[in-house]
Image (cartoon, coloured by chain):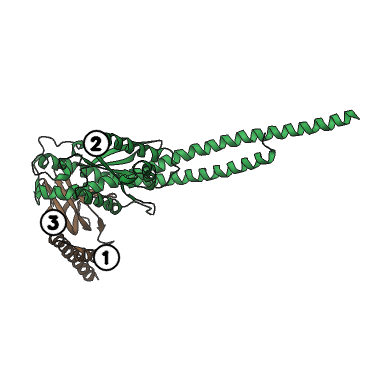
């Protein structure tokens, strides 16, 4: 049994989640990473992806879609500053499809190489999330 | 001496006005509650952001390659004043006090020979500044149609400021808004956005464990600073909405009270002149009877 630590998920509009958890999987911009108690102080940007939270005391895991932001691991615990966060249960295919469409437009609009690369990266990441979500849906049914 | 009929009309019209101000006060009170809740809900994010930024700035900010958003362009010539006010009036001195603060700031800068530009958020600030600085106002952003300000709205403004900064049109950016202290007190505040004001964040204790960064510190800082800009603007806008409603509430409260006083005065005057007229008529009748 893992030891519990404090986890906070904050969106610009409000504090979404503040509880003690066993582990959190964070979509870092250079790959997913798992935070357990006693993780070294660590700071990372996030890409669009799914945060996977295992609550302390063995509740059901919570999965939350975030659209980029920061993860800050300190001695006190983990704080995620998300640009936007929606629990996976509440998200529908439409929202994601819209995000993907936006990203596609960004790719089309991009003028120079660097912004185009960034937009394409984002599009791919979003598509990944979309695939993961729809995969989960179909397996649940 | 106004006639009885004009007095009656006057009283009726003041009563109607009082009803309107009373209704506006109640609307402002309920909006204030919502705005206050929104402003408070947004506080954790900006507080965390400030802490993270302070942490980063302490380690990376002192190096020579610090991002320009943090260190500034090195120049101090072109100033952008981002003036956030309400879109509607009837809220006491709220709009004019923010505009006055911005105006004084601009005059001081111009006296020093600096170049000053304005970006107005909210129509009322634009109206107040237009007369003096018509040519220096870049644009006015109206948020009238938006019911609940979302981060995306603030982000759009932040991107705009950023674009100006990157185009080299701005060296220093200052944000003006009304900070919400309480329902009866809103303080017009100026806050420097560019270069980022990381000094206000508490410097990390000397014994704080050193962080690991992924990707590197500069990349994170480069990502964080623009977002910090938007977060600051977002916070200012939320505070502004709460302040506006607070100011409106107390303004409408005193308007309602004034209307009540006025009604009392007019009612007294009306009764007196009615009595005077009755007395006059009686005297006329009696003296007419006596003359017979």
Q: Considering the numbered disc 2 on the image, is that residue within a helix, a strand or a loop? A: loop
**Label 3 Cα neighbours within 10 Å, binned few <14 / some 14-19 / many ≥20:** some
Most foreground residue, A61 or B272: B272
Quick one: which residue is furthest to the right in this view?
B292
Residue B132, horizontal then vertical, whole percent: 36, 41
Q: Considering the numbered disc 3 on the image, is that residue within a helix, a strand or a loop? A: loop
How far apart are the alpha carbons under marks 3 and 1? 22 Å
Residue A126, horizontal then vertical, whole percent: 19, 63
Residue A98 numbered tag? 1
Q: Which chain is green?
A: B
Looking at the image, tell me whether mark 3 or mark 1 is earlier in sequence order: 3
Give the letter of the chain under mark 3: A
Residue A29 numbered tag? 3
**Label 1 Cα neighbours within 10 Å, binned few <14 / some 14-19 / many ≥20:** few
Q: Considering the numbered disc 1 on the image, is that residue within a helix, a strand or a loop? A: helix
How far apart are the alpha carbons under marks 2 and 1? 49 Å
Task: Report the mark closest to the observer, 2 or 3.
Answer: 2
Residue B112 showing in the rendered view: yes
**Label 2 Cα neighbours within 10 Å, binned few <14 / some 14-19 / many ≥20:** few
Say above or below: B283 vs B130. above
Image point 32% across, 43% down: which residue? B83
Residue A38, horizontal then vertical, whole percent: 11, 46
Relative horizontal placement of residue B233, taking residue A49 as reference (left or right): right
Q: Colour of chain A?
A: brown
Give the letter of the chain under mark 2: B
Relative horizontal placement of residue B242, taking residue A52 as reference (left or right): right
Most foreground residue, B143 or A140: B143
Residue B113 numbered tag? 2
Residue B206 occupies which quadrant of the picture? top left
């Amino acid at each position: 049994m893992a030891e519990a630590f404090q986890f906070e998920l904050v969106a610009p509009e409000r504090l979404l989640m503040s509880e003690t958890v066993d582990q959190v999987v964070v979509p870092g911009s250079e790959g997913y990473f798992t935070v357990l108690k006693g993780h070294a102080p660590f700071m990372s940007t996030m890409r669009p992806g799914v945060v996977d939270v295992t609550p302390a005391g063995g509740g059901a895991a919570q999965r939350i879609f975030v659209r980029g932001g920061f993860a800050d691991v300190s001695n006190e615990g983990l704080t995620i500053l998300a640009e936007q966060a929606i629990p996976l249960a509440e998200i529908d295919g439409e929202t994601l499809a819209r995000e993907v469409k936006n990203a596609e437009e960004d790719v089309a609009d991009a003028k120079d190489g660097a912004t185009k690369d960034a937009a394409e990266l984002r599009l791919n990441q979003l598509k990944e999330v979309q695939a993961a979500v729809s995969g989960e849906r179909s397996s649940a049914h | 001496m106004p006639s009885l009929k004009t007095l009656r009309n006057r009283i009726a019209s003041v009563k109607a006005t009082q009803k309107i101000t009373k209704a506006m006060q109640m609307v402002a009170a309920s909006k204030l509650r919502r705005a206050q809740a929104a402003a408070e809900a947004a506080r954790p994010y900006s507080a965390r952001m400030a802490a993270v930024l302070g942490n980063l700035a302490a380690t990376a900010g002192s190096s020579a390659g610090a991002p320009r958003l943090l260190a500034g362009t090195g120049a101090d010539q072109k100033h952008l004043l981002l003036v956030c006010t309400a879109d509607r009036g009837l809220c006491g001195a709220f709009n004019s006090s923010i505009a006055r603060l911005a105006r004084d700031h601009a005059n001081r800068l111009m006296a020093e020979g600096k170049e000053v530009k304005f970006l107005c958020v909210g129509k009322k600030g634009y109206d107040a500044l237009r007369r003096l600085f018509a040519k220096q106002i870049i644009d006015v952003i109206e948020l009238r149609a938006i019911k609940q300000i979302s981060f995306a709205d603030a982000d759009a403004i932040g991107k705009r400021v950023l674009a100006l900064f990157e185009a080299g049109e701005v060296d220093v950016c200052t944000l003006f808004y009304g900070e919400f202290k309480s329902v009866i007190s809103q303080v017009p505040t100026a806050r420097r956005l560019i270069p980022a004001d990381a000094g206000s964040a508490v410097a990390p204790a000397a014994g704080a464990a050193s962080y690991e960064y992924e990707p590197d510190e500069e990349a994170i800082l480069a990502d964080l600073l623009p977002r910090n800009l938007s977060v600051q603007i977002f916070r200012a806008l939320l505070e502004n909405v709460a302040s506006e409603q607070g100011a409106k509430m107390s303004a409408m409260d005193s308007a309602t009270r004034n209307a009540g006083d006025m009604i009392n005065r007019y009612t007294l005057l009306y009764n007196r002149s009615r009595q005077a007229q009755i007395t006059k008529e009686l005297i006329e009748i009696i003296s007419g009877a006596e003359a017979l």
